Image (cartoon, rainbow, N blue to C red):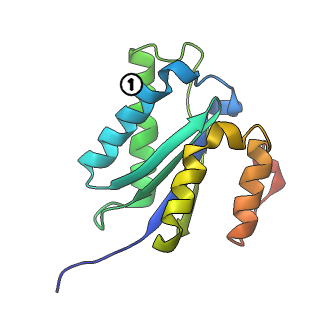
Amino acid sequence: MGTYTQILYQIVFCTKDRKPVLLKENRPELFKFIYGILKNKNCHLYRINGIEDHIHILTSLHPTVSLSSLIKDIKIASSVFMKENNLFKEFTNWQEGYGAFTYSIKEKDRLIEYVKNQEEHHKKITFRDEFIAILNEHQITFDQKYLL
């Protein structure tokens, strides 16, 4: 028997201290780079987007790829890429930690639109409030001190 999985992840992580350094004009280059990492690991990217201080990645993972190692690889490689290419002059690093949430494939289209419309979405809600809402939606217990 083969290995079959269908796990849709929304991955969210921030710049160090949530500094608004991911300027719009260079974000597509960053997103393209991250897409390359996912593709090389045989993961399927549905959508990637973000604003100045955080990004969202909607993806399914290949069964041989662990979530934590994927995020570690994305953060390390993209940090080096951004610094070497001077993409975002004030970028220092990604913040420690991340959020990763699973969804039914039935929610794929809604999530694609949600990630696609991050700029509009954040005109109405702060990242902190958004992240708390996602944590609550997934019934995840969290400590307020880790939410800047």
User: Where on the picture, by quarter, is residue 59?
Assistant: bottom left
Residue 19 in view of the camera: yes
Q: Which percent across, then down, holds residue 31?
A: 43, 35
Q: Which percent across, then down, holds residue 46?
A: 41, 53
Between 73 and 56, which is closer to the camera in this rendering? 56
**Left or right relative to 127: residue 80:** left
**Left or right relative to 5: residue 129:** right
Q: Secondary structure at mark 1?
A: helix
**Left or right relative to 139: residue 145:** right
Q: Which percent across, then down, holds residue 23?
A: 58, 21
Crowd class of label 1 (few under 14; some 14 to 19; many from 20; radius 10 Å): some
Give the position of the C terminus as an image quadrant.
top right
Residue 98 in view of the camera: no
- Vertical position of residue 13 compared to residue 5: above or below: above
Between 102 and 108, which is closer to the camera in this rendering? 108
Q: Which percent across, then down, holds residue 7?
A: 43, 70
Residue depicted at x 62% and y 22%: 21
Q: How many marks?
A: 1
Give the position of the N terminus as an image quadrant.
bottom left
Determine the residue located farthest toward the bottom in the rendered image: 1
Q: Which residue corresponds to mark 1?
A: 81
Residue depicted at x 76% and y 59%: 133
Residue depicted at x 65% and y 32%: 53
Disc 1 marks a residue whose amino acid type is Phe
Determine the residue located farthest toward the left in the rendered image: 1
